[in-house]
Image (tube, rainbow, N blue to C red):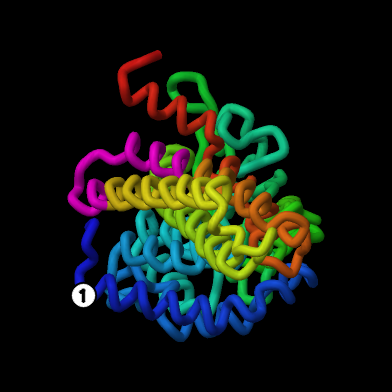
Amino acid sequence: MSELSEDYEDLRRSVQDFAQTVVAPVSAKHDEAHSFPYEVVEQMAGMGLFGLPFPEEHGGMGGDYFALALALEELGKVDQSVAITLEAGVGLGAMPIFRFGTEEQKAEWLPDLAAGRALAGFGLTEPGAGTDAGGTATTARLEDGCWVINGTKQFITNSGTDITSLVTVTAVTGVAENGKKEISTIIVPSGTEGFVVQPAYNKVGWNASDTHPLSFTDVRVPEGNLLGERGRGYANFLSILDEGRIAIAALATGAAQGCVDESVKYAKERAAFGQNIGSFQAISFKIARMEARAHVARAAYYGAARRMLSGKPFKKEAAIAKMIGSEAAMDNARDATQIHGGYGFMNEYPVSRHYRDSKILEIGEGTTEVQLMLIARELGLP
């Protein structure tokens, strides 16, 4: 995949053009207003981006996960909020339905999700539980043919937009044979009585991305809303996160490359002491290191995607790609801001958004420390 096929390259160029001509001009406006970019999402839906990895029979484009990753890299170069809206909408929202849903569930939910007419949230994290599944406190009990759900979730992307149709939530549904909590996944449609989307967070970055805490008070949904096998909820979500790390790595690679592109442009235009600052070795070497980071990050997620699509184990490679990509994005954002000097501290410059946005890439969908733990475990270390 180091050399893209014609189909992949056509997709990449199409999304690149869209990102530069449609997304970039409105990014600062939505970031400042903390507003969800509905008009951008609608156009992404029209391009088929939300359906990239899904088969045509479910309303998708018949592509694969690498196609999604390529799109995310191009979007991530100019606007991480838009990129994460697509990543979460596909990888966290629709993918669990596709991977684990019954045929009836797929028929009901996937066509709108794959078409981008609707979005879905991924309700895993809680105030006291994220990486630690044992801390899950949300419960669901069966009563008269319904699941009755009580609890809270936090930091849930795409959970409160006007087009959000459902949230899948993990909940304790009993006690497993080993004495640990039995955790299952349940589909909760938007608007269900007792399901409340709390006010949006005031975040450091990703300001145009929709993120809310959620509360569930005696929420009743049909027993048939169980997603996947009872007791397999957390395990299923972990497999979704393995795939998602490739997508986040692609987004992070885009952010890292976006910082390079902006820094090269600025270094060629900005003059100091009678010459462009790009002629100063301190600046040119810094940009060269930034390019190297982006290059390595791209190679890492390409490799992880290659293993995934060939059916080989890819957990370690996905963790490596996610860690390298997110660190490259953060390091490049810091260097790009430094290169821009005072202008880099002004919000109208794209590098300032990357500086604020990139930190969450080292936290969301598994912190850097979690990636290191996964890599060590795959090496046979305790």
Three-letter amino acid code at the position of disc 1: Glu
Could you tell me residue 283's position as x and y percent? 57, 51
For the N terminus, give its image quadrant.
Answer: bottom left
Residue 353 drawn at (x, y percent)? 68, 60
Taking 4 as reference, is 73 left or right? right
Q: Secondary structure at mark 1?
A: helix
* Residue extent of the magenta highlight: 306-325
Q: Dot 1 corresponds to which residue?
A: 6
Q: Residue at x 68, y 58 (%)?
A: 340
Nearest the viewer among 162 and 184 is 162
Picture layout, residue 265 above or below residue 322: below
Magenta segment, prevailing SS (helix, strand or loop): helix
Quick one: label 1, few (<14), some, or many (20+) residues within 10 Å?
Answer: few
**Within the image, what quadrant is residue 341 found in?**
bottom right
Name the residue located 39 percent from the left edge and 73 percent from the top edge. 51
| In the rendered image, the vertical position of residue 296 relative to residue 192, given as above or below | above
Q: Nearer the viewer, residue 346 or 229?
A: 346
**Residue at image point 62% right, 76% down:** 163
Q: Residue at x 61, y 70 (%)?
A: 269
The answer to which image quadrant residue 49 occupies is: bottom left
**Quick check: can you spot residue 222?**
no
**Residue 104 visible in the shown view:** yes
